[in-house]
Image (spheres, rainbow, N blue to C red):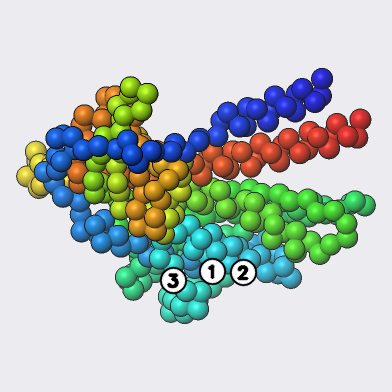
Amino acid sequence: MRRALVLFLLLLLVVGCEVAPEVKMAQLTKRQEDYKVAKIKPPSYIIKKRKPRIVVLPFSDTTGLSQCRLGVMATDIVQNIVASAGSYSVVERAKAKALAKEIGFQETHGADWGELEKKYFAMGKNIDYAIVGTVSSADATVGKSGVVTEVSMYVRIIDMNRGSVAQSFTVKGSHYQEGVVNPCAVFQKALEDAVKCPLLIRLREAIPLYGYVREIRTYVKDGKMSKVLFVNLGSSDGIAPGDKVKIVKLEKFVDPVTGKVSNRYVELGEGIVAKNGLLPNESMVLVEDPNLVDKLKIGYLVKATSSKVAGECAGKHFLQGLNIILKQMQQQ
């Protein structure tokens, strides 16, 4: 009965995973509609693929555990997470520290976020976003078999161009380490568990990654017609097989009050990055939605979503919970 339960849970995990489709290149053709071009071209920064520049400023630590230097740990962890995402240009640690010193940032207890943000907004330096935060609580329970640590962090992603907070959120994490170990090392694992998934999801939401459609081809498989989009986003941008992307159309919008003309981003539907054809600066996106295939045009935007990251994070938490269940079974 227990084995059946475990197998059922694993099956749910597998079924819930998004599988990247494989496109057979020999079955791609060009039809007349595949040459249509959008009236409004993508913005130059999307064409040139200028990555948003992010600075991770020193995190403060209000836990009182100065011996563990949790603020420094959190700063390094966040810096590594952002750098590994592949979608952003990250200011080097040394320069970030120099900028923090320049604006008078200090790791103080009860920091006045309002005053600090005013200084951040006045920084300039061609920085698009700043990430700041606080390790607000940290507890360790030492038992005979090991150490359990729990941490809480408060994080803000600040839009330097608009002078506003793009995202603010609190995360919590815990970690268990068997044996007699230094609690500070276990706190580091808890911080990594707390921040990695939420930060990647919030970054993608706060700082959308856009590319554009370079080419369209028709794909017929098993009598069903779909479209394959060749887009200017690839592995160097953090794109991976199975990622979902939004297809976005640019429309001109005239403010009825001010008369000001601007572009409005209209999401039309979704596509999924194919298993094959992934290059550093290009990928193939399969669009199967019958309501969308006839509307696609060269020059439309593609917007990366956080769905895959969210799914991987959910799977990770699921496996952690499953591991606890298995340990409980072994003890019975």
Query: Is 5 on the left or on the right of 41, as rendered?
Result: right
Q: Quadrant of residue 67?
A: bottom right
Indicate which disc, 2 or 3, sits on the residue closer to the N terminus. 2
Mark 1 is on which residue type? Answer: Pro
Q: Which residue is mark 1?
A: 58
The secondary element bearing badge 1 is classed as: loop
Characterize the local packing of mark 2: few (<14), some (14-19) or many (20 or more) Cα atoms within 10 angstroms: some
**Do the numbered discs 1 and 2 sit on residues whose CB atoms are within 8 Å?**
yes
Q: Residue 244 placed where, x, y %? A: 41, 39
Residue at (21% x, 29% y) in the render:
294
Q: 142 or 196: which is nearer to us? A: 196
Residue at (79% x, 33% y) in the render:
325
Indicate which disc, 1 or 3, sits on the residue closer to the N terminus. 1
The secondary element bearing badge 2 is classed as: helix
Query: Is 61 on the left or on the right of 244, as rendered?
Result: right
**Do the numbered discs 1 and 3 sit on residues whose CB atoms are within 8 Å?**
no
Mark 2 is on which residue type? Answer: Val
